[in-house]
Image (tube, rainbow, N blue to C red):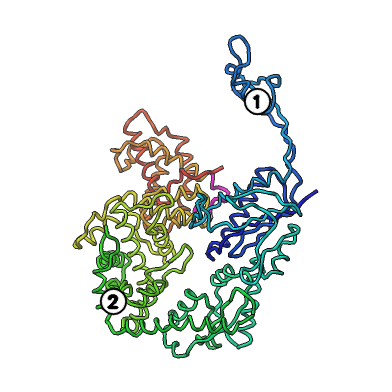
């Protein structure tokens, strides 16, 4: 016989951004709990609104299966005293297992005899197992936690009711002062308390009381209502899946409606209007068929259509002050020049242990020029990069960004264009923030990408220099995100820059600036930190761990080459000869590691004893001569092509020859070859079978 079980945790309204993640977490935790408790089930259906997290488990087993198991106890010498009597250790062990000392038998484990008992564990009824769920619920974690009343429990929001219903029977348990029952709550304003008759009645009972508990069905209804309004007015919707998800997690009974605002506000940049509507009011923006933003919006209320006209007027009324503020800021900001805004940055702190924002811009500008020279930018490009570096944070002191922080960079580009800056300079002002998330958009312009790299590098160097280094999950200045952004930009642009060893050169670039700290401090930690971001990048590409370890165990300073080496090794893993080729090369690497530090770096053919030495020397010398001009793919092809030559070499030669001169000559030859393989990473890290 199987059962259906309903679990609902009713809370005060949760922030929209945690609802989806929270129900997924509860689902996973409960599923793991049931598996650990050996309770079979068919499926788990999720329900989530701002006020509830609920699961309906179907096909739930009637009880745990019985278990017969053998349990190991103390060693025989501990279980028996000198007279052969059972010790307290043996008696306590059997008592704890629910058996007696008469059930003990001895078995040898690695030559030592231990106590063993066989016990029968009767399966518990499912209701008794489910009564343990409070431990699962209270173990949940959230980005923000709160306490309430005099309780010590921390949860996303105060728990107000609990439903625990196995078919039609309550499975009682309590969390703090809330006891689970069959009573849930309908819509906060339109509904009332509801007694659920059976677990499977849950969704229908709530729908009858103005709650659509299934978040997927609720979202589909919102989309249907929005598209109906769009079709009715012949608009084009700005599709926004993130906003849709947020709105879905703000309502229980959605009703979409359209509102309007005065056309005079259309003089504002689109980004300002969209931010005012989307981020502040959760409004969906609409356009005409030519793509022009219209003075209308669509929103969703948490309720029915009663008094909807008042709701529309209220939303329109709330939007006006925001648009008025934006219009005022936009007009006022244009009364000052960019240079006046830049001058204010000397009084804006980047960090109290590091510098002002103006000083950060100066450092970033110096790094950007150094990187630009390495990439071979033209004089005109370097001049534009210098101008962008000199102004790129100016919008931080504008009134618009002061009110709408999310418009940093965006307003910078808009104001820069209005002030007559070159389009490339204006674009770099906006793009230096990118990417703003793990999968966020990357800069598309050369200057924007360079400025973004320089700005992020300066932040990393500066925070490490004052010992504000990320540790564990603690990364208050988002340095991991910035380092990951650097790697993504480099790979996207295909720029070969020695970022892993650039810190010393960066310090030279800023040497004429008045720094409060040592720009080269913690250089080894900075390199490891950046290398870890490359590893994460490769992991996100689903490369094998041994390939990642091999490619990143390198002296190469160019992240793009490291990524390319990893991708190259991964692409050849399935090759028929890969195992033999790598084993040949790794044998070279391992022996070369035994070479003394003062080993001569040149190979003397006069010390060769047999033809295999000449063959290997000729091949390696030819490869070394052209290695700098070869692509990694060609280098890999030529290295792996040496497998037979290497095998013959080791067959005919004892590397550690009694003749010291011969031995050192052979070690020098292998070291030269090992150094060439090092351009691909440490191939010895590869697992080949």
Q: Which of 335 and 362 is in front in this view?
A: 335
| Secondary structure of residue under mark 1 | helix
Residues packed near mark 1 inside 10 Å, few (<14), some (14 to 19) or many (20 plus): few
Q: Which range of residues does the magenta coloring cover?
A: 568-579
Name the quadrant containing residue 596.
top left
Residue at screen point 60% across, 88% down? 234
SS under mark 2 = helix
Residue 272, percent across and down? 43, 80
Query: Where residue 344 appears, x then y in whole percent?
Result: 25, 73
Q: Is residue 379 visible?
A: no
Query: Image quadrant for the C terminus?
Result: top right
Q: Is residue 570 magenta?
A: yes
Q: How far apart are marks 1 and 2 (CA)?
A: 85 Å
The residue carrying mark 1 is 95
| Location of mark 2 (residue) | 380
Q: Does the magenta stretch include residue 494?
A: no
At x 69%, y 66%, the residue is 206
């Amino acid at each position: 016989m199987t059962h259906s079980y309903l679990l609902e945790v009713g809370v005060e309204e949760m922030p929209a951004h945690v609802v989806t993640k929270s129900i997924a977490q509860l689902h996973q935790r409960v599923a793991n709990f049931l598996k650990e408790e050996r309770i079979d089930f068919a499926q788990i259906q999720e329900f989530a609104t701002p006020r509830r997290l609920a699961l309906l488990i179907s096909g739930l087993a009637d009880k745990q299966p019985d278990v017969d198991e053998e349990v190991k106890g103390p060693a025989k010498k501990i279980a028996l005293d000198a007279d052969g009597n059972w010790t307290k250790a043996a008696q306590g062990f059997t008592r704890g297992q629910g058996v007696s000392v008469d059930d003990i038998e001895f078995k040898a484990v690695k030559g030592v005899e231990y106590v063993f008992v066989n016990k029968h564990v009767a399966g518990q009824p499912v209701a008794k197992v489910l009564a343990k769920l409070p431990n699962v619920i209270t173990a949940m974690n959230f980005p923000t936690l709160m306490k309430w009343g005099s309780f010590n429990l921390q949860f996303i929001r105060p728990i107000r009711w609990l439903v625990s219903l196995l078919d039609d029977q309550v499975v009682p348990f309590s969390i703090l002062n809330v006891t689970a029952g069959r009573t849930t709550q309908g819509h906060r304003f339109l509904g009332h308390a509801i007694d659920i008759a059976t677990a499977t009645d849950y969704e229908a009972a709530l729908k009858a009381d103005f709650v659509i508990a299934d978040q997927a069905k609720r979202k589909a209804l919102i989309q249907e209502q929005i598209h109906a309004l769009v079709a009715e007015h012949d608009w084009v919707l700005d599709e926004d899946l993130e906003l849709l998800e947020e709105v879905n997690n703000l309502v229980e009974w959605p009703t979409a409606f359209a509102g309007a605002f005065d056309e005079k506000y259309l003089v504002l940049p689109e980004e300002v209007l969209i931010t005012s509507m989307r981020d502040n009011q959760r409004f969906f923006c609409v356009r005409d068929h030519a793509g022009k933003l219209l003075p209308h919006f669509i929103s969703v209320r948490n309720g029915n259509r009663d008094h909807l006209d008042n709701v529309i007027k209220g939303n329109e009324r709330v939007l006006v002050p925001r648009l008025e503020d934006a219009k005022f800021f936009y007009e006022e900001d244009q009364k000052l020049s960019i240079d006046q805004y830049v001058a204010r940055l000397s009084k804006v702190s980047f960090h109290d242990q590091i510098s002002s924002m103006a000083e950060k811009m100066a450092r970033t500008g110096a790094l950007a020029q150094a990187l630009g020279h390495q990439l071979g930018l033209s004089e005109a490009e370097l001049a534009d990069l210098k101008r962008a570096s000199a102004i790129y944070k100016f919008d931080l002191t504008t009134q618009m960004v002061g009110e709408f922080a999310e418009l940093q960079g965006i307003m910078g580009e808009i104001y820069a264009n209005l002030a007559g800056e070159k389009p490339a300079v204006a674009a770099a002002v906006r793009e230096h923030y990118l990417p703003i998330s793990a999968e966020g958009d990357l800069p598309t312009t050369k200057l924007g990408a360079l400025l973004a790299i320089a700005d992020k590098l300066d932040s990393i160097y500066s925070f490490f220099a004052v010992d504000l280094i990320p540790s564990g999950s603690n990364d208050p200045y988002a340095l991991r995100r910035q380092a990951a952004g650097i790697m993504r930009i480099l790979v996207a642009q295909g720029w070969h820059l020695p970022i892993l060893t650039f810190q010393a050169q960066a310090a030279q670039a800023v040497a004429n600036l008045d720094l409060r700290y040592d720009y080269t401090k913690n250089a080894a930690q900075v390199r490891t930190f950046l290398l870890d971001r490359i590893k994460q990048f490769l992991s996100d590409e689903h490369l094998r761990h041994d390939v990642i370890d091999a490619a990143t165990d390198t002296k190469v300073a160019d992240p793009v080459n490291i990524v390319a080496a990893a991708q190259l090794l991964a692409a050849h893993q399935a090759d028929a000869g890969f195992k033999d080729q790598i084993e040949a090369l790794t044998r070279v690497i391992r022996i070369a590691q035994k070479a003394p530090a003062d080993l001569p770096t040149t190979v003397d053919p006069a010390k060769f004893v047999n033809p295999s030495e000449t063959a290997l020397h000729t091949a390696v010398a030819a490869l070394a001569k052209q290695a700098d001009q070869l692509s990694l793919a060609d280098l890999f092809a030529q290295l792996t092509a040496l497998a037979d030559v290497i095998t013959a070499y080791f067959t005919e030669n004892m590397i550690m020859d009694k003749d010291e001169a011969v031995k050192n000559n052979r070690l020098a030859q292998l070291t030269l070859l090992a150094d060439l393989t090092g351009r691909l990473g440490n191939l010895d890290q590869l697992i080949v079978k």
